[in-house]
Amino acid sequence: MTWARARDFILPALKDGAEDDLLDDIARGFVQLWTGRHAAMATQLVRDPASIHCWLAGGDLDEILALMPGLEAYGRAMGCTHATVDGRKGWARVLKPYGYERDGAELRKVL
């Protein structure tokens, strides 16, 4: 899926209309774009602690959840020890069955 298709899922979650900055970060490899047919997510690798961090997601919830194992596998392959998620408080309930626990303002899972 190209950005043109993922755009409708990601933009509602993007703060401050920073679409150009996001596109630049994707092009430079600083941000990974994960896509399904009806959902998309954006992640970035964080050094300390070594984590894959999901900070944007939108679209069909079932597809977002279906993307998570691939995101986590990629994080492990890149040396990450954790996966973290930013988002609304409701994500804590949704992701708890998948091993994510509240850690301050984020949700965190040991990989």
Image (tube, rainbow, N blue to C red):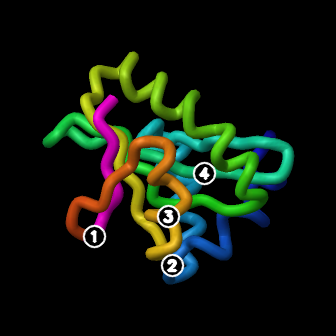
Q: Nearer the viewer, mark 3 or mark 1?
A: 3
Callout 3 amino acid: Arg
Please give the label number shown on residue 77: none
- List x then y, in percent, for residue 42: 54, 50
- Label 2, residues with CA under 10 Å away: few <14, some 14-19, many ≥20: few
Residue 50: which quarter of the image? Answer: top left
- Residue 18 position (above or below residue 103): below
Question: Circle 3 sits on which residue?
Answer: 93
Alpha carbon distance from label 4 to label 3: 18 Å
The part of the chain drawn in magenta is: 105-111
Q: Which residue is mark 4?
A: 41
**Residue at the top extreme?**
77
Which residue is at a point 28% across and 21% down the rendered structure image? 79
For label 2, the residue is 15
Q: Residues within 10 Å of mark 4 (few under 14, many from 20)?
A: many
- Label 3–label 1 contact, CB within 8 A: no
Kind of element beneath mark 2: helix
- In terms of image quadrants, where is residue 68? top right
Residue type at the position of mark 4:
Met
Residue 107 among magenta residues: yes
Question: In the picture shown, does residue 57 fall above or below 14?
Answer: above
- Closer to the N terminus: mark 2 or mark 3? 2
- How many numbered circles are shown? 4
The residue drawn where x is 30% and y is 61% is: 102
